[in-house]
Image: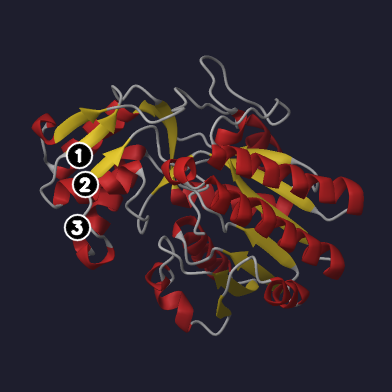
């Protein structure tokens, strides 16, 4: 049995990944999470009762804690991060502290204790906006907002630990994930919960920003393949969902919820709101056998159903206002 440390494992994507590992049956798992606003033990659900899972509440900044946890694992899968773009515009320092300094603490512990694999979960936003074409793993990183810049910096430190110290680091760059249990600050859950609560939702600008939407299970599939088969020192783009403008995604959500366009308003665009992200996933497909399985129709139906059935898990006191995908598929807990 491999011993896997999952950071941010009570967050949206991290919790789904923990459940995937449990289903595979070949791992014992330690989850460390600070349980800030986007982390919720409910995301792990019955997994917390599994004897193969140990939960530790703690922050990446706690170096003695992190050192001890890494010493007792074979593999690190690093989801923990501040991930909301809009929040980064007003509080860039916390993003640097968690995403950059916190990642450094993990990497230094991995170097000291000699882990077998370190998977750093990043975002397609590190490439910056693309008017045309799709970014490949060897393309330059040109982040344009503090969130993306902090993730790009963390990537560079992680890969430097491979080149300098031979820490077996792999990087994943994921697109916008959606699915059950996501904190309602991101477009899909914000609009679903707002509409279910009878609110009006607000698109930034004219809703023309383009994102690739990938079901969380497909994202976890890609991350798991990188953990098991990824070549140390390499980055892998994880996407291949559906490219939509935010307005097009809103139309699909309205139809699934059963609401009309009279429930949608338009507001000022967000600062530095990248118009389009796009990544080429041929490397992950060819080298790892990655193949997304979820259709957008099935994924949205499941997601809306979950939010209908779990009103205790979301808070509708704040109006839903979303622009260009407020944070990428990295979508982690801080």
Q: Which mark is residue 241?
A: none
Q: Is residue 172 above or below residue 16?
A: above
Rendered residue at 37%/51% (across/down): 179
Q: Is residue 287 above or below residue 308?
A: above
**In the image, 85: left or right of 118?**
left
- Dots 3 and 1: beta carbons under 8 Å? no
Residue furthest out toward the top = 132
Rendered residue at 62%/25% (across/down): 135
Query: Where does residue 201 sit, x and y in percent of width and height?
Result: 20, 39
Of the 4 image quadrants, the one containing the N terminus is: bottom right
Q: Is residue 317 above or below residue 222?
A: below
How crowded pointer 2 is (Cα within 10 Å; few <14, some 14-19, many 20+) is rated as some
What coloring was used for the rendering? secondary structure
Task: Examine the image and state in which quarter residue 297 appears.
Answer: top left
Q: Is residue 105 above or below residue 242?
A: below
Residue 290 visible, this orientation? no
Secondary structure beneath dot 2 equals loop
Secondary structure beneath dot 3 equals helix
Q: Kindly identify which residue carries mark 2.
A: 319
Sequence order check, earlier mark of 3 and 2: 3
Secondary structure beneath dot 1 equals strand
Q: Kindly identify which residue carries mark 3.
A: 308
Sequence order check, earlier mark of 3 and 1: 1
Tag nearer the camera, 3 or 1:
1
Rendered residue at 45%/50% (across/down): 216
Query: Where does residue 248 sit, x and y in percent of width and height?
Result: 29, 27
Q: Which mark is residue 201?
A: 1
Query: Where does residue 55 sit, x and y in percent of width and height?
Result: 54, 78
Depth check: give the residue in front, 301 or 272. 272
Sequence order check, earlier mark of 2 and 1: 1
Query: Where does residue 215 sit, x and y in percent of width and height?
Result: 42, 45
Per the model, the C-alpha gap separating discs 2 and 1 is: 7 Å
């Amino acid at each position: 049995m491999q011993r896997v440390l999952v950071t941010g494992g009570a967050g949206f994507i991290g919790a789904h990944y923990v459940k995937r590992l449990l289903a595979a049956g070949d791992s014992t798992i330690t989850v460390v999470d600070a349980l800030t606003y986007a982390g919720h033990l409910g995301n792990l659900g019955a997994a917390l009762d599994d004897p193969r899972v140990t939960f530790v509440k703690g922050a990446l900044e706690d170096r003695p804690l992190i050192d001890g946890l890494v010493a007792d694992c074979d593999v690190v899968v690093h989801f923990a991060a501040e991930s909301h773009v809009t929040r980064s515009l007003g509080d860039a320092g916390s993003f640097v502290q968690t995403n950059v300094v916190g990642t450094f603490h993990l990497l230094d512990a991995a170097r000291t204790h000699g882990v077998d694999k370190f998977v750093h979960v990043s975002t397609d936003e590190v490439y910056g906006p693309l008017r045309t074409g799709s970014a490949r793993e060897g393309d330059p990183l040109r982040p344009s907002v503090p969130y993306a810049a902090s993730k790009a910096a963390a990537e560079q430190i992680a890969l430097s630990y491979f080149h300098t110290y031979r820490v077996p680091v792999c990087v994943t760059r994921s697109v916008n994930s959606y699915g059950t249990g996501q904190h309602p600050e991101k477009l899909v859950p914000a609009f679903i919960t707002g509409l279910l609560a009878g609110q009006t939702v607000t698109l930034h600008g004219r809703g023309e920003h383009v994102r690739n939407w990938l079901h969380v299970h497909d994202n976890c599939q890609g991350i798991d393949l990188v953990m098991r088969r990824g070549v140390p020192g390499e980055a892998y783009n994880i996407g291949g969902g559906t490219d939509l403008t935010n307005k097009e995604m809103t139309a699909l959500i309205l139809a699934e919820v059963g609401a009309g366009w009279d429930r949608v308003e338009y507001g000022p665009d967000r600062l530095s709101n990248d118009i389009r992200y796009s990544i080429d996933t041929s490397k992950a497909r060819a080298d790892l056998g990655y193949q997304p399985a979820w259709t957008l129709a099935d994924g949205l139906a499941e997601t809306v159903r979950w939010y209908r059935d779990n009103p205790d898990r979301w808070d509708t006191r704040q109006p839903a206002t979303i622009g260009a995908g407020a944070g990428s598929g990295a979508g982690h807990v801080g």
